[in-house]
Amino acid sequence: MNAHLELISTARHFYQQGWMVGTAGNLSIRLPDGSFWITASGRSKGELSPSDFIHIYADGRVEKFSPDLKPSAETAIHQTLYDLFPEAMSCYHIHSVEANLVSRFVEGDSLPLPPLEMLKGLGVLEEKPHSTIPIFANHSQVSRIASEIQQRFRTTSPPLPALLIRDHGVTVWAPSPEAARNYIELVEYIFRYMVAARNVGSRE
């Protein structure tokens, strides 16, 4: 499928799930030359058209269909993840209620995850795994978030192809757009489970 059509379809699906309300979130697909297409800023993710994307070259140059388009604020994060993980061919970032709730379950920089079967879809194959997802602080300057991701992941490989930005959202990267879509759905399932489990525990 054409990269734009793939992103339009995925964005509409995530919008319908309530994960990309308003104009929130951003999706990108990497091309063989190292450049990538990313959703433009300020566009409803439920109503994207093929002209609502910006082409980012590997050296950071920007190509856009019309002068009024602006790159997504999180472009720097996508670029950083593509630089860190050469095998990544897609990067998806959404803003869900559950992602923001679980980011507050701990004060530290990583969130323990329950040993659910769904972790296998994220590459965790051990029985009764002790998995975590990295958490980063939210900053108004996204370049600062990207810098902190780069510094941390260059020294410590992330246990999962996913990260949380506290009070902001979740980002995944994957070797294909199909895999990235699956990763988003899997982490969101895990987050919903964690929120539900905490609610049940609070009533007991």
Image (spheres, rainbow, N blue to C red):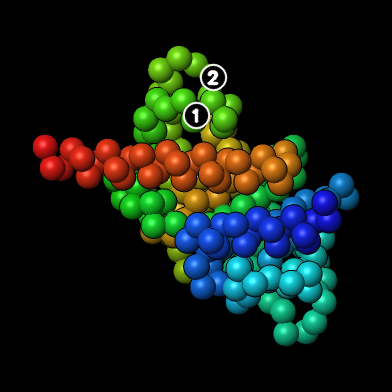
Q: Which residue in the protein does label 1 denote?
A: 119
Q: Amino acid at mark 1?
A: Leu
Q: Earlier in the sequence, mark 1 or mark 2?
A: 1
The image position of residue 111, as x and y in percent, is 38, 39
Viewed as shown, does residue 185 lie left or right of 130? right
Visible residue check, residue 110: no
Residue at the far top in the pictured view: 127
- Against 73, residue 159 (above or below) is above
Given residues 200 and 132, the one toward you in this image is: 200
Q: Write down the quadrant of residue 84 in the picture.
A: top right
Q: Residue furthest left?
A: 204
Instruction: State the separation of the CA atoms marked 1 and 2.
Output: 7 Å
In the foreground, 201 or 56:
201
The residue located at (56%, 32%) in the rendering is 122
Name the residue: 60% across, 41% down.
182
The quadrant holding residue 175 is: top right
Q: Mark 2 belongs to which amino acid? A: Leu
**81 on left or right of 60:** left
Q: Residue at x 82, y 71 (%)?
A: 63
Q: Farthest residue to the bottom: give it.
A: 68
Q: Which disc number belongs to residue 26?
A: none
> What kind of element bears circle 1?
helix
In which quadrant is the C terminus drawn?
top left
Q: Quadrant of residue 129?
A: top left
In the image, residue 55 above or below residue 110: below
Q: Which residue is mark 2?
A: 125
Secondary structure beneath label 2: loop
Image coordinates of residue 157 in percent, x first then y, are 57, 32
